[in-house]
Image: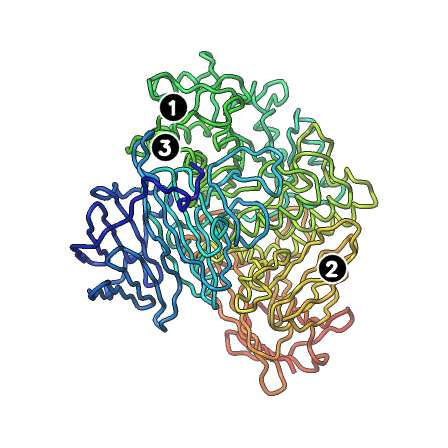
Amino acid sequence: MEQDPRSRAQGKRTPQLVYRWEKTGAICHFYAPQTTLEVSVVTDHILRFRYSPYGSLMQNFSYAIREDLPTPPTSIKVEEHDDSFFLETNSLRCVISKTLHISIYNLDGQLVVEDERGFHWEESHQHGGNFVYCSKRIQEQEVFFGLGDKTGNFNLRGRRFELWATDRYGYDKNSDPLYKNIPFYQGLHHGLGYGIFFDNTFRSHFDFGHSNGNVSSFWADGGQMDYYFIYGPELLRVVEGYAVLTGTHELPPLWALGFHQSKWSYFPESQVKSIAQKLRELQLPCDAIHLDIDYMDEFRCFTWNADRFPDPARMIQELKADGFNAVAITDPGIKLDPSYSVYREGIENGYFCRRADGPLMRGEVWPGICHFPDFTDPAVRQWWGTKFEDQVAQGIAGYWNDMNEPAVFELGTFPEDTRHDYDGHPCSHRKAHNIYGTQMARATYEGVKAQIFPRRFLNLTRSGFAGMQRFAATWTGDNISTWEHLWLANLQCQRMSISGVSFVGSDIGGFIGNPSPELFVRWMQLGAFHPFFRVHSSGDHGDQEPWSFGSANLPAIRKAIETRYRLLPYVYTTFRQHAHQGTPVIRPLVYLDQHDPQTHYRMDEFGLGPDLLICPILEEKSEGRQMYLPKGQWFNYWTDEEVTGGKEVWTEARLDTIPVYVRAGALLPHYPVMQHVGEEKLAELILHVYYTSQTYASQVYEDAGDFYEYEQGNYCIRTFSQVAEKGQTVIRQYTQGRFNSSYATFNMVLHGFPTVPKKVTIRLTTGEEQKIEVHTDGDTPEIVVSKQFEKLVIK
């Protein structure tokens, strides 16, 4: 049902007057004829609204919400007035009219969001249940962001979208829907940021003033109206609040943040080994090689083609010895083949999806006619997880869940009458479709983790729903080798990051087509600043290895990869901030300064963590561009030029350079260039120190990089505070955790200091003070200090 709710003249129903209400702890119920509203206080900043037409509320079950939500606050107040109820937390005042219209204010009395028509519904005569709707008033100059896997301009104002997981081969800037479904958006007006998460897995729709310029609305073709309001007022805090509800990515192994080389497909073994050897010969750092569907025996999951890969364990161990991790694809379709043990087990145990009248659901994918596991059944997920045992024992270090929208060649997806267990809440595919990909990724994640522990691993998924980040990273699907798709990759990854899915990247160079050398170089430069950094292409369109674009372009490609490896400790630190508190790794410009209206409509620039600002080159034959710097002081990463923000600046960017700026005050950690993570033990950590006349704090996070021991405290967080005091710069270090890194010293490279330092002293944690020599023989002054320093003074 794609109609806007406002266009339906017949059959729509709205709540009547509340006749009774009650409060139990942090939950309030308001009862009107034919309607019940439940309002739950999750935190002082997060409220949940759940409506039920015609009786009692549905059973409280969600795949998206974490099981370990925080304990709700007890200090909430509810008052009844003549025509409304006031519910108040330590941050919000919610006004609920006796016709169940909602208005939410902060404690300064500023309106954050208000219902237009609010909740209403319409009976679904064909399927049963209801179409459920909610509409809000758009505030003056309000802008909208989020919704995950969507194309087009970053600001959603004036647009309309559908959420229905779809295998969209070769999509374009107007394609909708796509592979993933994240029904979470953020609004911003008058400096106030908030979020709405609509927890409903049915086909859903969002309208941000497209049908009526003054109204935003969201609705679903079934289920219940169940949404969470999340208050910032900072947009970054809104995304962190969403992480409170739906979780975060766990900290990936450090190698997973390195460079990945992939293709559909590398086979036989000799080609895989040749690719690995060439990467090392040309000194192109790389940590992973991906194996697409052709490694399998006639596309049967969990098998190897014995002719192409006669000894997988040996091959994988030989790759590992040279610093490569093997990542293998898996698909949900199980070939109808009585000689295939996975098929027999699925049949014998009833693990495959059935149609409404009883027969097993059948569909054609890569192996031919297949049955499909019902990943919404806990027993099926557990069974699926055990199937990885042999390959994990052989050394596979990661998995890649594909075709899980779910995609079916002749049908597009499963018929709507396909039945699902839905963790004991039986339903049709209308409800389970959007969650299917996440539950497949979950089954893979839980199964592989049980077998590979205590090591960490990589899990990828093409499709997913809200909460998918707890189980998998993702990429933007089957894109095209065009400049438009380079622009789209930039926007899609920003949008996914603020929708809770920070571990995201694109198929660099484009999956479909053949990029020009210039396009490939520019895409590699962008990909180096995306958390998931992978080249992947379709084998029938030509080669896309870094050396495929001629020797003249190889230095620029190598520079992009080496830049990523130098910045790995910063990327890892930023990822830990996400895993710990939900802060997005990629931060769109408006999330760096939401009070500057100039940032509300810009979309090319983005932050990586708190201290880097990147602006990719998105046009052919361009050697520079205008870009906007947020307020404050910034340093050009390549030239050390200092620039005052709050304005556009021209930045030169010849083919080997992408515009990158560093925030003044940052201490930016670097590794020396390595061919793969862990190639050698660090002798020192390089810290690039950018001068500030203000006060600024930076962090460096460290652990073993490949194990879960950090969960037991085996990590180290170094916090550096830099402050200008009486004509000198003072840097203090605070440490937390018990991990002891291999290096003994910091090599501190000083950028932008007003004069060359004449005197540097440090105080160690032992209380001992030392004078430090300043090295000035390079482009910038450098000092080498013990990692145990407590205070450093630069004069």
Q: Name the disc covering residue 625, or none.
A: 2
**SS class of the residue under badge 1?**
loop
Note whether 138 is above or below 3 in the view shown: below
Image position, residue 223 (x, y; %):
33, 39
- In this rendering, which labeled residue sits more in front, label 2 or label 1? 2
Note whether 794 is above or below 379 in the view shown: below
Comes first in the chain, label 2 or label 1 = 1
Q: Name the disc covering residue 126, or none.
A: none
Foreground residue, 518 or 625?
A: 625
Which residue is most to the right? Answer: 552
| Residue type highlighted by circle 1 | Cys
How far apart are the alpha carbons under marks 3 and 2?
48 Å
Q: Are marks 2 and 1 in contact (CB under 8 Å)?
A: no
**Which image quarter is the N terminus in?**
top left
Comes first in the chain, label 3 or label 2 = 3
Image position, residue 492 (x, y; %):
57, 47
Note whether 317 is above or below 259 in the view shown: above
How far apart are the alpha carbons under marks 2 and 1?
53 Å
Question: How many residues crowd around disc 2 within 10 Å: few (fewer than 14), some, or many (20 or more)?
Answer: some
Residue 246 visible somewhere in the drawing: yes
Comes first in the chain, label 3 or label 1 = 1
| Residue type highlighted by circle 3 | Thr
How far apart are the alpha carbons under marks 3 and 1?
10 Å
Residue 442 visible somewhere in the drawing: no
Name the residue that disc number 1 marks. Answer: 353
Name the residue that disc number 3 marks. Answer: 376
Q: Residue at x 21, y 43 (%)?
A: 56
Image position, residue 208 (x, y; %):
48, 52
Image position, residue 488 (x, y; %):
62, 46
Which residue is most to the bottom? Answer: 726
